[in-house]
Image (cartoon, rainbow, N blue to C red):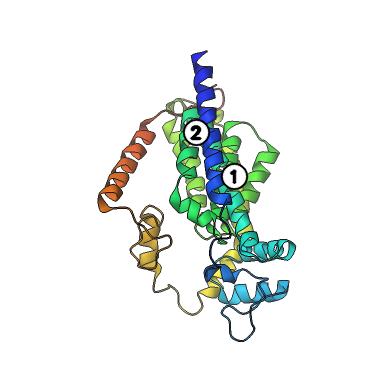
Amino acid sequence: MQHRDNRHVWVGVLFLAVVAGAVLRLTGLDHGGMTHPEVYIPGIPLPAGISEPPPRLTFLDALRWHFHDEPHPVGYYMAMFGWSTLFGVSPVALRLPAAILGTASILLIAAVGWRVWGPAAGAVAALLLALHGFHTVWSEAARMYVPGSFFVLLATWFLLEIAGDRRRPWGEAGYVLSMAAAVNLTELSWVVLAVHMVWPALVLQRDPAALAVPLSRLRLWQGLRLSQLHGLVIALGAPEFAHALYTARRNAVETEAVPFLMEYLGFGFLYPDSAFAVPTLVAPLAVTVAAIALTLVLCASGLRAPVAVTPRLVDGLGG
């Protein structure tokens, strides 16, 4: 009975997190004018000959220009071309997809946390993301980062479903489609795909029961099936590979590649060393150091904590 009462408490926390996150992301979308990066959305009637980027008012013009001159994945811009054709090019219309998917991400991260560690972890994760200023800012901008992270979270949830049960065609199809969408929205998703590819081997290493099971009883089809799904994702991401190679024709590595990697690995651009960082970090140094220390402690604690649901890669073991 106490367990059920606790679950009701965490459901309440999750509800408050979703409401707070929705208010923060879905209100005030008409703030200010459009930023320069947002102007790259195709379909905006920009003045020809004097604007950068030039107007891209047809599907072929948008596809041609973004493949030839845009370093970011083409998939996001083509999706937004369809959106702007249907709903217009006002700031609110262009920012609404990121705001909706940013709000939905709060539910998704709760589902992932609940699935692996239980209701408390899911609710706390949702609350942290709902109040995360960095995520909130990008949820109110017509850029690809929040949509990409939404599909990464969705793919992660599907991956857990696939590993936790026997074959589910809908789960496998959902994983391939969501992860393929992610890699065609933002190049940052490839790192998550690499983690997904290594994850099954790490799960077997953490399962002490697997070490005492004959090879004939290992559920090898599951690991092999995941590898096949990853191969399908890579195949669907091949056009973006071609685009990346094409845009690198001028120089193999951009001059900002090393600072970019440093900031990406440094808490995901949260503490960038740049005067042009978006958003601007205003937290005092002491607060920043304390936040980093707390993050490291929580990460170490999470690695040591037992999971509520262990993916079953071994037949006849577990629940």
Q: Label 1: state its secondary structure.
A: helix
Q: Is residue 84 above or below residue 164?
A: below
- Amino acid type assigned to the residue bearing label 2 in the image: Ala
- Amino acid type assigned to the residue bearing label 1 in the image: Ala
Q: In this view, does 148 lie above or below 17?
A: below
Q: In which quarter of the image is the C terminus?
A: top right
Residue 2 on image: x %, y %: 49, 15
* Quarter location, residue 92: bottom right
Q: Mark 2 points at which residue?
A: 123
The one nearer the camera, 165 or 201, is 165
Q: Label 2: state its secondary structure.
A: helix
Q: Specify the farthest residue to the top.
A: 1
Q: Name the residue under label 1.
A: 104
Which residue is painted at 49% across and 21% down in the image? 6
Left or right: 45, with 133 as reference point = right
Q: Specify the farthest residue to the bottom.
A: 49
Residue 29 on image: x %, y %: 57, 57
Left or right: 180, with 86 as reference point = left
Asked if residue 130 can be seen in this view, the reply is yes
* Quarter location, residue 22: top right
Which residue is painted at 28% across and 43% down in the image? 293
Badge 1 or badge 2: first in the primary sequence:
1
